[in-house]
Amino acid sequence: MVGLEIEERDEVVIARLTGELDIAEATFTGEAIAAAVSTARLGLVVDCSKLEFIDSSGIAMLFSLARRLASRRQSMRVAADPEGPVARVLEIVEFERAAPVVAEPEAAITDIQSPPA
Amino acid sequence: MPLRELPELFDDSVKARSLAYLYVAGATLAALTVALPHPERVNETALLLLALAALVIGAIFYLRADRTREWQLHAAVAVGTSLVALANHYVGPGLLYALLFSWTALYAFYFFDIRLALAHLALVGALYGVVLADQGQSVVHWVLAVGTPAVAGLAVSRLLESLRRQAAKAQARALALRESEQRTRLVLDSAPDGFLAIDEQGTVTAWNGAAERLFGWSGEEAVGRRLRDLVFTEAERPAHDERRQSLLDRPDPARIVSVEVELRRRDGSVFPAEASMSSVRTGDEIVISAFIRDLTERHRRREEREALLGEQAARAEAERIAEMLSGMQLLVDATLVHRSIGDMLSELVTRIRGVLQADAATIFLADEAQLQLSASSGGPPEEPPDPIPFGEGFAGRVALTREAMVSHDAATDLEDPSLAGLGVDSLIGIPLLAEGEVTGVLVVCAAAPRSFSGQDIGLLRLAADRVALAIDHARVYEREHRIAETLQRSLLPDRLPHLPGLAVAARYLPAASEAEVGGDWYDVMAIPGGRVAVVMGDVAGKGLEAASMVGRLRSALRAYALEGHDPATALDQLNRLAWTEEAASQMATLLYAIFDPADGVLRWVNAGHMPPLLVTEEAPRFLQGARSVPLGVLPFPGFEEVSSPVPPGGTVVLFTDGLVERAGTSIDAGLAALAGAVVGARVEPEALCDHLLRTLVPDAGAPDDVALLALRSVPMEDRFRDEFPAEPESLASMRGLLRRWLRHAGADDQQVAEIVTAAGEAATNAVEHAGAEGDTPFEITGRVAGSSVLLTVRDSGEWRAPRGEDRGRGLSLMRALMDSVEVEPGPRGTRVTLRRDLASVGSGGDQLG
């Protein structure tokens, strides 16, 4: 059972995930997040720092989001606790190739708002 | 009569005093002899000394006469005799002294029995013989001196004896008389009737115990008072005076006058009595005696008998009607509720038949313009006939016209197939009407020619009204009961969910006597995170209303639970539902608990419900915390959550009060009985539930509904095996169970997370590729081999190569996280074996491939 909380701050959409994300809800969750990010927004931060579990379906959902945003020229960051199980899985599947993984969600927001020149 | 038994004429004090007089007389004689002219030879000094001695002895005896003993008397007589003998010696010969001797001796004859008297006489004779011999007197003197008192003494003795005999007889007679009087008094005292006697002046002289009880006056109080004032009312006094005078005029014990009079008790109350009086002359007095008998009881009985006789005739008819009415009323009232319509109707017709003394009675129930025979008494028990349309046959005509009908010619009226073969002669048919609708027809038949009276019809019409009402009630009740029962059944889970690592069993036992369904309910839900929510509740009230309330609470709580609300929040929301539901809130007690098998913690909220019982290897204990008011009592009760660890193997028992409440004992006693019953019982929930119901519920059934639920945290073992439905929702519980087992197997947090991720991928594959049916379960087994854990996930589906850009990472993940991964596809399913060495540091060796 996953928890999803959407916040918008200064043109950035923040999606906070809690609980456990598996195949039961991955597709639904991904669609809900995608729907919250309109094309007018700068980008998306998927905050997984409070997510306790993620499986390959969840990872697939994140890859799909990253692709969709990239195609719209929007930025995406994933925040995950480097010591937690989610970061470990992201590392194994080399998610960094799709979108940057950062430790702190706040840093990710700032990162999107002020893109490197 | 032997002499010694005769009464003594004189007592010892009289004897002592007379002896004292004799001494004084002797002393006086001696003094006189000295004082008067006397012969020279008289020794004056000796005589005066003897007189003095006699005077002293006489005085002593006189003064202590009352204390004299018999031997002292004998001694005194002997001493006196000696003194006289001495005096004779000093005086010289003379007749005077001889006589004195005689009197001394006579005293002995007066007072002592004859042998003692003769002994004294012998002493006198001896001493006198000495004196006479001394003085040289002749033997004639001696014979005279001794013989005279002997003869006189014997004569006196005889005389005294006869006197004593007479006295003894008189005494015996007096004694006998006294005894006889006492007997008479006893007899009178114990007589059941009052006895009293009055003298000529009308003063009470006798008053026995029964009279005391009758009038309230004790014997002491009554005796001496005038009877007229004591027991007679003003009105009765002249008659009493007249009767008394007549008895006094003609005293005759054989003439008994009996009268019935009103007499007055001490407290002023008056009672009817029978007085039997007679008068008798005793001496110069006339005594009137009377026996008094209280007639109150006899009068009452007579009055009752008269009243009874007087009423009997009038009552015979009234009674018959009253009996009929009350018979019907009793029947209808008793059957208004809690019985099936069929049972009720059978009893009704039996009773109606009895009350009307008819040969058969039948009730048809109406159903859409057709009559169906529903119950009959007295007729042949036949197959239920086809329905009769309104208007056909006798009963059909009654239904159509809605009028009572009487037929005395059943031969022509009886086209009715249902009444055929009864040998019926006369019939009454009454329509059963409820709220203007024909609900049925009541038919009463007599086999012999009989004219049913207008009264019979009136009575039957009265009964029919009640019967119709009862049928109506019963139908409504039955419908409601059926709905409530169905509703309640649908509200209890018919199958408990499969909960990995947990065993759960539940029982619902309806009350034995109560026909209405109760508001007890329970629920078990698998909720996110591999946790389980259990609910035990009791809605106040019964029947449809309670059942629908259960429905509302259950649906709402399921929603809150699945939303992931913690117990306190869920109950707050539930209370809002119960509280605002209606103006008069419906009250419900509820225990809501969430158990997480992963950490073995039970968290619960108790809204006024029985505390759960925790059964572990230690003594069972009730989880008392978190108690607050029931739902629907306060708008904001503020529920509080409490948690308690449930060790592996521990069981939590939830129940409703029906399990522990028994009439005559306290709840505490019931709870103690429950705690006692689990000790030593088998811990498997199914067995435990059976055991508790068997132990705690009386054989006759529970007085109230009982709901019972046992949830056991199955202890982990080194090997584990579990099955899960092949659906995505299973994965969370599978992970929960696996985490628990891995911790048991010794994995650290990171290892647990990684192994769970890998196993989750294997399981996801199993879910995604499940067999065609889709609902075949997948199986996961785990075991420890050396320092490694081995997990096998087996499904019945076909292994498919991952397709698509974002798919296929599962296998990579598994390989990255495990030390080895083996996928064995087969015709009947796929087996994935995962191995992870817990001793090695970090992740497995394989990298992404």
Image (cartoon, coloured by chain):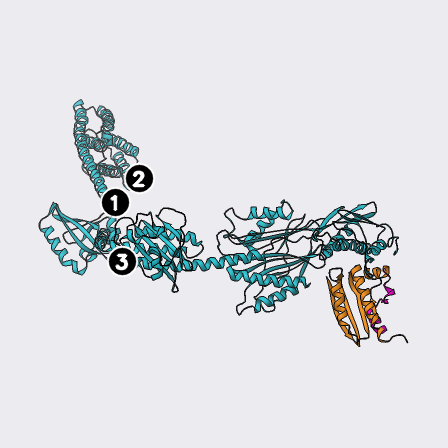
Chain of the residue under label 3:
B
| Chain that is coloured orange in the picture | A
Q: Which corner quadrant holds the C terminus of chain A?
A: bottom right
Local crowd size for mark 1, using a 10 Å CA cut-off: few (<14), some (14–19), many (≥20):
some
Q: Is residue B646 left or right of residue B1?
A: right
Question: Which residue occupies the foreground of this view, B121 or B39?
Answer: B121
Disc 3 residue type (three-letter): Gln
What residue is shown at x 68% (from left), y 64% (from top)? B563
Q: Do marks 1 and 3 both belong to one polypeptide chain?
A: yes
How many numbered marks, from 0 up?
A: 3
Counting from the top left corner in percent of width and height, residue B828 is at 75, 47
Counting from the top left corner in percent of width and height, residue B56 is at 29, 39
Q: Secondary structure at mark 2?
A: helix
Ranked by sequence position, the earlier of labels 1 and 3 is 1
Disc 3/disc 2 C-alpha distance (Å): 105 Å
Disc 1 residue type (three-letter): Ser
Is A94 colored magenta in this rendering? yes
Chain of the residue under label 1:
B
Residue, disc 3: B455
Above or below residue B614? Residue B584 is: below
Chain B representation colour? cyan
Counting from the top left corner in percent of width and height, residue A23 is at 75, 59
Counting from the top left corner in percent of width and height, residue B772 is at 71, 52
Question: Which residue occupies the foreground of this view, B748 or B218?
Answer: B748
Residue, disc 1: B190
Q: Secondary structure at mark 3?
A: helix
Ranked by sequence position, the earlier of labels 3 and 2 is 2
Q: Secondary structure at mark 1?
A: helix
Which of the labelled discs sits on residue B67, or is there none?
2
Q: Which residues are magenta?
A: A93-111
Ranked by sequence position, the earlier of labels 2 and 1 is 2
